[in-house]
Amino acid sequence: MEIGFLNISVVDITTNYPIADATVNIYSVGPDNQTSKTVYQNLKTDISGQIVGLNLEAPDFIYSQQPSEVKPYSQYVLEVIKDGYETVVLNGTQILAVAIALQDIKMAPKQRCRGSYSRQNEVVVDIEEHTLWGTFPPKIPESSLKPIPPPTGFVVLDNPVIPEFIIVHDGLPDNKNAPNYWVYFKDYIKNVASSEIYSTWSRETIIANVIAIISFSLNRVFTEWYRNQGYNFTITSSTAFDHKYTRARNIFDTISVIVDEVFDTYMKRPPTARQPLLAQYCDGVRVECPGQMSQWGSKDLGDQGLNYEQIIRYFYGENVVFAKAPVVSGVPVSFPGEALQIGSKGKDVRTIQNQLNAISKAYPAIPKLKEDGIYGEATSNSVKVFQKIFSLPQTGIVDFKTWYEISRVYVAVTKIASLNPTI
C-alpha cells in the first residue's frame, strides 16, 4: 500500500458559506464494500470550513498506470456532523496513491419546527465506482457533427459560449424519475474527468481528455441536443449517451488545476466552423471505438512524450483545430487578457480587490483590502490565501484560472439563493 491525500471542504448548501467547527469522521471500506475501521475521528473544520493534508492508504501507484485486476484506488466513508445541519454521510470517496483528492461536502440546515430544530434522517450518498473500474454501458456511437436546428428551434447562440451552469439529468434520457442537477460548468467538467480518467496520468494526457470532454459538452449545449427532443436538461449522466457525472464524488487536484486552465478550450473540425466536435471516446480495452479516442491509448501516447494536440489529432484527425469560447454567463467582468500582479494598476485590479473583500465576508482568512486599484503586497497576499483555500497554485498572481475562480466564488457567496442546490 502507498499513501494518497485528502482535502475536505464543508459549506452551507443555501449560502455557499464555509462551515467552521464541523466534525468529520472517516472510515475505511473493506473488499466487501463494508465499513471496516475508523481512520480519523472527531476532526474539526477550520475557519474556511476545511481540513487539509489527510494521509490515507491507497493501492500501489502502478495499478492506475495500466489496466489491472486490482482496483487502483481505495474508498472511504466520510461522516460530517454539525449542530443545526443534517448529518451527511458519503460512501465511497476515492483515494489514489500520491494524488490529492478534493472532497466538497454541502450541508443543509435543519428545518425549524415550532421553535426547535426538527429531527430528520441523515443524508446518505453512495458514490459510484470510477468508470475505468466499474461496469457501465458503452457509448452508443453517433455522428460527431450534429445538424444545427433552424432559427425557430431552441438554439439562440451564434457561436459556442461557456455557460454558467449545465443541467445534468442523472439517468437515461427517458427516465422521468431521474433528478436534474444544476452544476457549474467547470465543476461538471472536473467531476466527469475525475470519474473517467485517473489523475495520476501525464499532464498532456489529462489535457487531451479534458478538452475532449469540454468539446462534447459544448456540442450538447450549442446544439441544444436534448431540448430539441423535448427534454428539459442539457446532458445526461449515462455513459451510453454522454459522460459519467457522479453526484457528490471527490475530484483530484491535478485535474482541477488543468480544467481551470483550459475550460474555455474546445476542438472543432472544418468545414463546420462553429460547432464544437462531439468528441466521443472509450476506454480502448474493454470497449473499442475506431475513429475515436481511447483513454488508455491516450495515456500511452502521453507516456511517449506526445503533447495534448498531438494526442487529440492522432485520434480525431489532423484537421482538428482548437478554439476558445467566451465566458459570458454568470461572470461579472471578463478576464482582462493579461495577468494582474505586483505593479499592476487600474479598474481590473480594483475589481479583484472588491470581489476578494466580498468573498472575505464568507472566508475571513482572506485579508481585507483597500480598494485603490493598486496591486501591491497586500493584494498579492490576499490572492495567495484565496488560491490556497480553493486549491490553485499559490503564486499571488491573478492569471486566467484565478480570475475566473474568484469570479465564480464571488457570484456564489453573493447570490441571494442558488438555483437548484445539491450535495
Image (cartoon, helix red, strand yellow):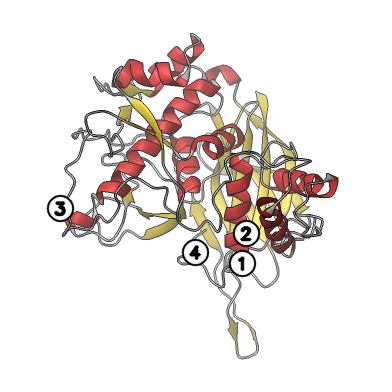
Residue located beneath label 1 in the image: 414
Res 143 quadrant in image: top left
Q: Nearer the viewer, mark 4 or mark 2?
A: 2
Q: Nearer the viewer, mark 2 or mark 3?
A: 3
Sequence-wise, which precedes: disc 4 or disc 1?
1
Q: Position of residue 35 (x, y in %)?
A: 59, 44
- Say whether marks 2 and 1 touch (CB < 8 Å): yes
Q: CA distance from mark 4 to mark 2?
A: 17 Å
Q: Residue at x 55, y 43 (%)?
A: 250
* Towards the viewer: 340 or 234: 340
Sequence-wise, which precedes: disc 3 or disc 4?
3
Q: Quadrant of the N terminus?
A: top right
Dot 3 lies on which element? Answer: loop
Q: CA distance from mark 2 to mark 1?
A: 6 Å
Instruction: Please state which amino acid type lies under the numbered disc 2.
Output: Tyr
- Say whether marks 3 and 1 touch (CB < 8 Å): no
**Vertical side of 204 occupied by 99: above or below:** below
Instruction: Please state which amino acid type lies under the numbered disc 1.
Output: Thr
Sequence-wise, which precedes: disc 2 or disc 3?
3
Tag shown at residue 421: 4
Instruction: Please state which amino acid type lies under the numbered disc 4.
Output: Pro
Q: CA distance from mark 2 to mark 3?
A: 37 Å
Q: Position of residue 407 (x, y in %)?
A: 59, 54
**Vertical side of 415 occupied by 55: above or below:** above
Q: Nearer the viewer, mark 4 or mark 1?
A: 1
Q: Is residue 166 left or right of residue 387?
A: left
Q: CA distance from mark 3 to mark 4?
A: 34 Å
Sequence-wise, which precedes: disc 4 or disc 2?
2
Residue located beneath label 3 in the image: 150
